Image (cartoon, grey):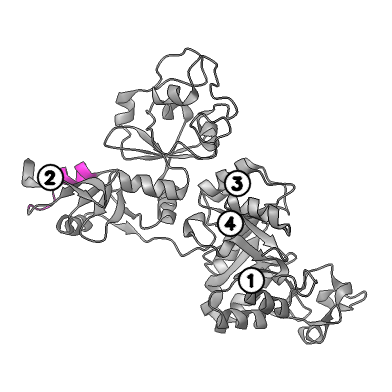
């Protein structure tokens, strides 16, 4: 045993290697750890990815951190080269249309038919061929994996640049690639493949490396594992049979019913004040031929929705968030997103403590950077109904951006396959607007949140 620092033990039910010893950290030790997942066994089992090239440490405290690592350090690879690396028999399940043991998302990655267990019809199932190193799309073909090539890639995280950027980790232990599908799965795999390291050696290692801080807190990502995102009160929710009111009265009522996540339509008045108002509903406020930009905030404040409910401005909504610390507000300013967000951030800085619970909806990719430059919101939703965007383009965008949620019309855009693919990137999926409770239950079974008027 060299340097006296290798001991096998079990930690939290997981066999790990415990590195210890009094010798100073040397180049050989650093070289041995490159590309591995390090587990601080003396400090609550904290996990770190030790990058094989940059020698930086990446924190894996939560599933969202695993996603951040994939996005930040993943290297592009062609399908031809990826096929040379053997596939590990772990994390291959999920929604499986043909019941062949490979999830539909994996079948896309492998280029196989998700509806046929044996895509090349050679008598061997896709899963068996893949695990044995054959090409499942070529009947009676030979082994396509290359052990020599694979072992030169150990410790790296690869992204399939010719597909949807599916992520794979090549383990230094067995030179096999592990599918990092959903963030929770990636997180679990990384921890299972970890090796333990003592505090003494970890402190020494800090002198050689850097670490990246974990991302901000999100409530929309599947890895956040909360029930808040299951229901979104559309236009602040139904009130006494009225839907789409965008009023504080409705918000207060629905908060009492258990809603925590509210969506609100916002517009700018003549004097550039932000008010809760859906363009096109002028008649419900008795505005006649006038539009919202033709009246001041003071004039808007005197109006009633359907001659019954007082109108609401952004000041009242921010006050409500300030009072109720468990409330989140989705902004849907259809006409002037940037103007509305800018007004909130610049003119209402006294409520900056609640900004982390504000979730802007953007309508095209170019708006993301502008919004995030105004304030670094932990959550931002991309909504699909305003522009014609291909699924492949959307997947490419959200893989490389800070989007944490996607919302779509359940009749026109939604599919189980697309939803699963988006959620595999740790992006929350939402549909609008659904009031049928049976349908809501179906979406919830697929971990999809719903915008609803009265479905809770």
Relative to the observer, which residue lies in front, 315 or 14? 14
Which residue matches tag 2?
Answer: 6
Relative to the observer, which residue lies in front, 98 or 32? 98
Magenta-span inclusion, residue 383: no
- Picture coordinates of residue 111, whole percent (x, y): 54, 28
Q: Secondary structure at mark 1?
A: helix
Which residue matches tag 1?
Answer: 341
Quadrant assignment for the C terminus = bottom right
User: Can the viewer see residue 204 in this picture?
Assistant: yes
Q: Seen in the image, is 65 located left or right of residue 278?
A: left
Q: Secondary structure at mark 2?
A: strand
The numbered mark, 4 or 1, whose residue comes first in the sequence reads 1
Give the Cα distance between marks 1 and 2: 55 Å
* Nearest-to-viewer mark from 4 and 1: 4
The numbered mark, 3 or 4, whose residue comes first in the sequence reads 4
- Picture coordinates of residue 242, whole percent (x, y): 80, 72
Say which residue appears at 86% left-offset and 81% top-offset: 307
Which residue matches tag 3?
Answer: 419
Give the Cα distance between marks 3 and 4: 11 Å
Q: Residues within 10 Å of mark 1 (few under 14, many from 20)?
A: many
């Amino acid at each position: 045993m060299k340097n006296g620092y290798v001991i096998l033990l079990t930690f939290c039910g997981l066999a790990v290697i415990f590195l210890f010893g009094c010798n100073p950290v040397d180049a050989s030790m650093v070289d041995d750890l490159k590309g591995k997942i390090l587990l601080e066994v003396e400090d609550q089992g904290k996990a770190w990815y030790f990058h094989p090239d940059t020698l930086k440490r990446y924190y894996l405290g939560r599933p969202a951190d695993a996603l951040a690592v994939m996005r930040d350090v993943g290297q592009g690879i062609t399908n031809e080269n990826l096929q040379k690396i053997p596939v590990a028999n772990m994390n291959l399940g999920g929604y499986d249309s043909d019941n062949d043991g490979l999830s539909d998302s994996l079948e896309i990655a492998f280029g196989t038919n998700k509806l046929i267990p044996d895509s090349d019809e050679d008598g061997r199932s896709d899963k068996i061929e893949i695990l044995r190193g054959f090409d499942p799309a070529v009947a009676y073909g030979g082994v396509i994996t290359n052990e020599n090539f694979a072992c030169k890639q150990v410790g790296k995280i690869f992204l399939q640049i010719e597909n949807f950027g599916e992520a794979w980790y090549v383990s230094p232990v067995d030179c096999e690639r592990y599918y990092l599908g959903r963030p929770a799965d990636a997180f679990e795999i990384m921890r299972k493949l970890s090796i333990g390291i003592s505090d003494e050696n970890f402190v020494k290692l800090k002198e050689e490396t850097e670490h990246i801080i974990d991302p901000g807190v999100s409530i929309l990502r599947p890895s956040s594992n909360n029930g808040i995102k299951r229901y979104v009160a559309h236009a602040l929710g139904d009130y006494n049979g009225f839907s789409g009111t965008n009023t504080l009265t409705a918000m207060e009522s629905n908060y009492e019913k258990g809603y925590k996540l509210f969506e609100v339509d916002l517009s700018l008045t003549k004097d550039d004040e932000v008010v809760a108002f859906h363009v096109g509903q002028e008649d419900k406020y008795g505005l006649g031929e006038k539009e919202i930009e033709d009246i001041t905030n003071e004039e808007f404040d005197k109006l009633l929705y359907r001659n019954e409910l007082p109108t609401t401005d952004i000041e009242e909504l921010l006050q409500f968030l300030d009072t109720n610390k468990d409330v989140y507000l989705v902004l849907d300013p259809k006409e002037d997103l940037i103007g509305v967000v800018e007004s909130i951030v610049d003119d209402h800085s006294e409520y900056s403590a609640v900004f982390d619970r504000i979730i802007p909806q953007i309508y095209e990719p170019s708006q993301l950077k502008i919004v995030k430059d105004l304030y670094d919101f932990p959550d931002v939703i991309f909504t699909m109904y305003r522009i014609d965007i291909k699924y492949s383009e959307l997947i490419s965008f959200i893989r490389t951006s800070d989007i944490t949620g996607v919302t779509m019309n359940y009749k026109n855009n939604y599919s189980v396959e697309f939803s699963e693919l988006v959620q595999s990137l740790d992006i929350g999926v939402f549909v609008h607007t659904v009031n049928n409770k049976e349908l809501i239950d179906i979406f919830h079974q697929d971990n999809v949140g719903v915008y609803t008027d009265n479905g809770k």
